[in-house]
Image: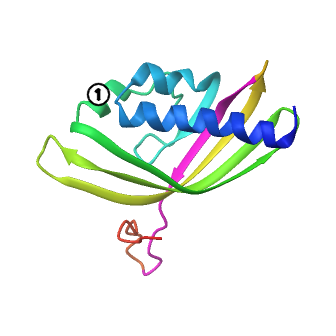
Amino acid sequence: MAKSDNKESICATVNAFADAIRGKNAQGVRACFTEDSVGYYLAPPLQVSPHEDDLEGWFATWTGSIGYEMRDLETTSGEDIAYCHCMCRLTGARTDGTETDVWYRGTLCFRKIGRHWQITHIHESVPMYMDGTFRAAIDLKP
């Protein structure tokens, strides 16, 4: 498979993942990941398998659909390993009445299984202010 074909196939997995988040489809999210995948999410704990994460519970904290944007996606691929990084935006109304609009950094790592690319690792992060407060810098925008 040519590198351009890799990029198209990787982007198809990324788009399926993003669409599943937007549609609050936990099964669709999990289908994008390998069985042995590891997630470093914004929310605790420090590490969790996407297959064990309580996506249904998290989706239930949103009213209506979830806004999920991945901007400036850059991909790099080899024969059977790839990664991408981007800026992610999460928006929407929460069941507690608050509105969410936050940008954060995202990295996805992939392994090619057969003819398909699946996510083996996801890492989400926000920078923190190094002024002694260690407060998450969720007010930043690209």
Tag 1 residue: 57
Residue 128 is inside the magenta segment? yes
The residue nearer to you, when weighing 128 against 105, is 105
Residue at horizontal 48 percent and vertical 44 percent from the top: 41
Image quarter of residue 116? top right
Give the extent of the magenta segment.
Answer: 116-131
Q: Horizontal and vertical percent for residue 126?
A: 47, 61
17 w.r.t. 84: above or below? above
In the picture shown, does residue 29 fall above or below 89? above
Residue 15 pos. (x, y %) = 54, 37
Q: Residue at x 58, y 56 (%)?
A: 86
In the image, taking residue 86 as reference, residue 8 lies left or right, namely: right
Residue furthest toward the left? 97
Looking at the rendered image, the quarter that the N terminus falls into is: top right
Q: Is residue 75 or residue 128 the one in the foreground?
A: 75
Corner quadrant of residue 79: top right
* Left or right of residue 110: residue 38: left
In the picture, residue 119 is in which quadrant?
A: top right
Task: State left or right for residue 51 relative to residue 107.
Answer: left
Furthest-bottom residue in view? 131
SS at circle 1: helix
Crowding near the residue tagged with mark 1, few <14, some 14–19, many ≥20 C-alpha atoms within 10 Å:
few
> Which of these two is toward me, 62 or 4?
4
| Residue 119 inside the magenta-drawn segment | yes
Residue drawn at (71%, 38%) of the image: 8
Q: Measuring 15% from the left and 40% from the top, which residue is drawn there?
A: 95
